[in-house]
Amino acid sequence: MKLLLTSAGVTNLSIRDALVDLLGKPIADANALCIPTATYAMGGPASAWRFITGQTPLPMCGLGWKSLGVLELTALPSIGEEKWVPWVREADVILAGGGDATYLSHWMRQSGLADVLPSLRDTVWVGLSAGSMALTPRIGAEFVEWPSAPDDRTLGVVDFSIFPHLGIEPDNTMACADRWAAEIAGPAYAIDDQTAIAVTDGTVEVVSEGQWRKLAS
């Protein structure tokens, strides 16, 4: 897939331009599916509703898509792949909301979506916070909220980890990011809410109107 891994959604023109480049078409011509699943392990149903309806300061579902559907991963095992896989393949973009990344990665595996991802060559995945972190190898123990998570490991679609919301006091300072990176012990980026990481065919590009840093592993 083509990936746009954000801290807080499409928050500025640079990130929006990167999204349009990945889509290869205007946002108004693109069909989107949104995944609210991660929200239930942290924010709850009101947060899920705000994400789906675009009633949030984190721009994702309210960007003006041609169409928007909800892909709830916990429902997919009872529907059957013959039903939901065509929905996914027909989408131009998948919008993965924030919450708990270990819960999201668990349900991506359980639903079968994780197995389908490698075949979605032209689909764009836009992650918001946990929606981005779920595709990394590890998220660090401090970002795990789901009590049933066995550890901090996630899907490892990319080979680097992400420390989001850089600069938000008191838990997301650069000093906190450095301590987190020492625990992760692998390639990682600290990004603020005006920054995203675009990945196409293994090429990584940081898109930012804010602050970010590649952290020592």
Image (tube, rainbow, N blue to C red):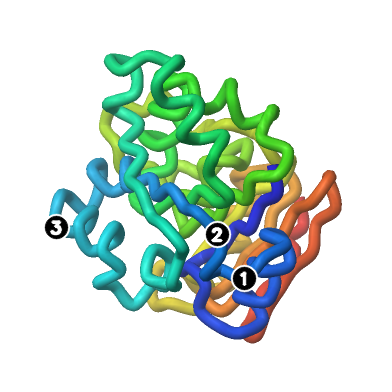
The residue under label 1 is 26
Comes first in the chain, label 3 or label 1: 1
Corner quadrant of residue 1: top right
Q: Name the one closer to the observer, 108 or 121.
A: 121
The number of discs equals 3
Corner quadrant of residue 102: top left
Of marks 2 and 3, the one in the foreground: 2
For mark 2, does the 10 Å Cα neighbourhood hold few (<14), some (14 to 19), or many (20 or more) residues? some
Query: Where is residue 45 drawn, in percent x and y?
Result: 15, 50
> Dot 3: what SS?
helix
CB-based contact (under 8 Å), mark 1 and mark 2 = yes
Q: Residue at x 75, y 48 (%)?
A: 187
In this rendering, is residue 121 above or below 190?
A: above
Using residue 203 as the reference point, say whether residue 214 is left or right of it.
left
Q: Amino acid at mark 1?
A: Pro
Q: Residue at x 65, y 50 (%)?
A: 182
For mark 1, does the 10 Å Cα neighbourhood hold few (<14), some (14 to 19), or many (20 or more) residues? some
The residue under label 2 is 30
Comes first in the chain, label 2 or label 3: 2
Using residue 48 as the reference point, say whether residue 187 is left or right of it.
right
Query: Where is residue 141 drawn, in percent x and y?
Result: 45, 42
Which residue is most to the left? Answer: 46
Q: Amino acid at mark 2?
A: Ala
The residue under label 3 is 46
Q: Residue at x 26, y 63 (%)?
A: 53
